[in-house]
Amino acid sequence: MSQKDKDLINETGENLAGNDEPVSENKNPETATDSTATDDAQKAEMMEQKLAEMNDKYLRLYSDFDNFRKRNAKERIDLLKNAGEEIIKSLLPVIDDLERAVRSNETATDIAAVNEGVKLVHQKFRHILSQKGLEAMESVGAAFDTDKHEAITNIPAPTEDLKGKVVDEVEKGYTLNGKVIRFAKVVVGN
């Protein structure tokens, strides 16, 4: 192909010379390799950017979770420290009543009045606790239940109908909102 034909091809991009030689824009293999290398470099750069973005998102998510975990642990510790605050505040009037009872007991001459005062304080105390969900278990005469009772000892049943039942209660059991918080210590008839 002559120089004139090459110039015509280069200017128009078509093979106007009529030759059957294929027209290629880049006949230099070095230039084709440079183009591929540039594309690969661009792809690698894009992948590095995506990796950096993903790593940044991961680090932010990890730190957010770590902060959440620490905050949650702190709130849990605060809750445990202050969980009894409400019940203690409600029991302060009972303490005040007991202190007044002790002071009046020092100069009291009427035992019946002291007994009545102690009973009133006891009722007030039990009422406050029952408002908070505390209930005493009734065990005497009930069937022995390992989910509620702790057997201290077995004795021969005084009557046939008390076999396998609670004969005596050594220490009362309590439930708080339906959950046993102290098992009743009982004597079981056999």
Image: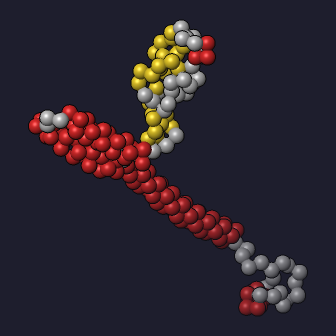
Left or right for 133, reference 16: left
Rendered location of residue 135, percent (x, y):
46, 39
Q: Nearer the viewer, residue 59 or 104?
A: 104
Residue 138 in view of the camera: yes
Q: Please report the residue visible at 73 percent of the width from the left and 87 percent of the height from the top.
A: 10
Q: Please report the residue visible at 44 percent of the width from the left and 55 percent of the height from the top.
A: 68
> Where on the picture, by quarter, is residue 47?
bottom right
Q: How many discs appear?
A: 0
Residue 74 against residue 110 in the figure, above or below: below
Residue 166 against residue 18 in the figure, above or below: above
Rendered location of residue 111, percent (x, y):
20, 33
Q: Nearer the viewer, residue 120 or 83?
A: 120
The C terminus appears in which quarter of the rendering?
top right
Residue 58 against residue 35 in the figure, above or below: above
Residue 80 in view of the camera: no
Q: Please report the residue visible at 38 percent of the width from the left and 52 percent of the height from the top.
A: 75
Rendered location of residue 12, percent (x, y):
76, 91
Q: Nearer the viewer, residue 148 or 55?
A: 148
Rendered location of residue 94, percent (x, y):
27, 45
In this figure, which colouring scheme has been used for the structure? secondary structure
Left or right for 131, reference 43: left
Q: Please report the residue visible at 50 percent of the width from the left and 30 percent of the height from the top.
A: 138
The N terminus appears in which quarter of the rendering?
bottom right
- Residue farthest top in this picture: 156
